Image (cartoon, rainbow, N blue to C red):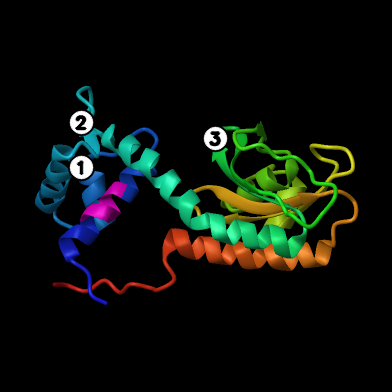
Amino acid sequence: MSTLKTLDRGLRALDIVSRRADGISVADLALDLEVDRAVAYRIVATLEQHGIILRLPQDGKLVLGAAVLGLERRFEPQFRRRARPLLDQLARQAHATAFISVAQQDKCAAILVSEPEDVLIRVGYRVGSTHAISKGAAGIAILAGRPPADGEPPEVTQARTSGFSLTKGALQQGAIGVACPIGGGTYEASVGVVAMEDLDVDRAIDTVKACAKALSALLTGAAQVTRDTV
C-alpha cells in the first residue's frame, strides 16, 4: 500500500508537536522531519489553517491546537463501540469482570466494563471510576506500556518484562486483577479482568493477553504501511 508523502509528513509533524510539552520551533520540526525549512513552513501553515496546531505568539513555537480536542472527543466513543464485543468475549472466557481503563494524568479511569453472566459473585467495576495510576493491575499495566523510567516501582518493571500485571487486594480486599497495556504508547490504556480469589489466573493471563493484542490492532492497525512517494 502506498502513501501520500505530503499527508504522511503532516501526520508525522502533528505527532512530533504532540510529544513536545513546551512546543517546538519550525526549524527543529524541519530537522525532525528531515525536510527543508520551507517545506516545514508549508506543512505548519496547513495544520494551522485547520486549527490542529497553533503558533505561540511569544516565541513562535508550535503546540497542539484546540481542534485536536474535537477529534479526541469523537475517538473514544468510536473505540468503545468497536471494543465492546472483544471485552464481552473476554468476560465470558475469563469468567470475570472485564474492563478497559485509560490514563488521566496521575489517575486511571475505567471507560468500558463488561460483567460475566455465568458467575454468582462478581466484582463491581463502574465506568468512570478512578484510582491512582500506581495502584491496581490496570494502572500498573498502563505504566508498563511506557518507556522505562528511573525509580519506577518494581511491579511496573516486572509487568513490562512479563507483558502483564497481576495484583492481589490492591484496590479491594480479596480481589485479583490481571491487565495488559494496549495502544502502543499512542493511546495510554489497558485491558484486564478482576475477580475474587477463585479466579483462574493462568486462564485470565492468556485471555487478557489475547484481548490486548486484538484491541491494539483496533488502535494501531494490523497491517504495516510502507511510506512511498506518490
**Residue 115: % across, % down:** 70, 50
Q: Please tell me in which quadrant of the rendered image residue 64 appears.
A: top left
The residue that appears at 47% across and 57% down in the rendered structure is 82
The residue that appears at 44% across and 71% down in the rendered structure is 222
* Mark found first going from the N terminus, 2 or 1: 1
Does 210 sit above or below residue 134? below
Closer to us: 67 or 100: 100
Q: Residue furthest top?
A: 58
Q: Which residue is mark 3?
A: 104
Q: Which residue is mark 1?
A: 26
Tag 3 secondary structure: strand
* Quadrant in which the C terminus is drawn: bottom left
- Does the CB distance between marks 2 and 1 fall below 8 Å? yes
Q: What stretch of residues is rendered in magenta? A: 10-14
Magenta span: chief secondary structure:
helix
Q: Which mark is residue 60?
A: 2
The residue that appears at 20% across and 31% down in the rendered structure is 60
Closer to us: 71 or 157: 71
> Label 1 amino acid?
Val
Eye-nearest disc, 2 or 3 = 3
- Per the image, is 13 magenta? yes
Tag 1 secondary structure: helix
- Per the image, is 46 magenta? no
